[in-house]
Image (cartoon, rainbow, N blue to C red):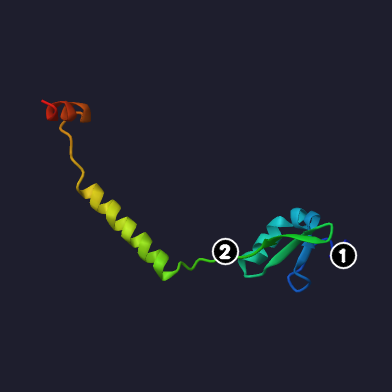
Amino acid sequence: MSKALMMPTPMLDSTLGAFDAKTHFSKILEWVAKGKEFVVTKHGKPVARISPMVDAVSGADQALIDKRRAVIAEMKANRIKLAPGQSIHSLISEGRR
């Protein structure tokens, strides 16, 4: 990226130096949010990629997430309700008698 440009533009090369990336980070994030991807270099060597997040969750992952949520909801529904003044310690002590 040419120092004369002072700021990368999405129509130009998607490779930029670390200094330019730091200097124009907020603008780069705007372009990334629109789908643009950048490679950041240090002394001409690629060291990082700035790219949009992938929101898609695989079907297997979503199934696991749903199952965990269902188990947590069931555990919350089956919780023992303690009477006022009652504690877990007192219930344990009762069970040992």
Residue 14 - label:
none
Q: Residue at x 27, y 53 (%)?
A: 73
What is the total number of numbered labels drawn onto the structure image? Answer: 2
Q: Residue at x 78, y 60 (%)?
A: 41
Question: How far, Cα to Cα, is label 1 from label 2?
Answer: 28 Å
Q: Earlier in the sequence, mark 1 or mark 2?
A: 1
Q: Nearer the viewer, residue 14 or 78?
A: 78
Residue 92 visible in this rendered orientation of the protein: yes
Q: What is the x, y in percent for residue 27? A: 70, 60
Residue 2 - label:
1
Q: What is the x, y in percent for residue 26? A: 69, 56
Q: Residue at x 37, y 62 (%)?
A: 64
Amino acid bearing label 2? Met
> Which part of the image, by quadrant, shows the N terminus?
bottom right
Residue furthest to the right in view is 4
Secondary structure under tag 1 reads loop
Q: Is residue 52 left or right of residue 65?
A: right
Q: What is the x, y in percent for residue 75? A: 25, 49
Q: Residue at x 57, y 64 (%)?
A: 53
Q: Tell me if residue 27 comes above or below residue 86 in the rendering.
A: below
Amino acid bearing label 1? Ser
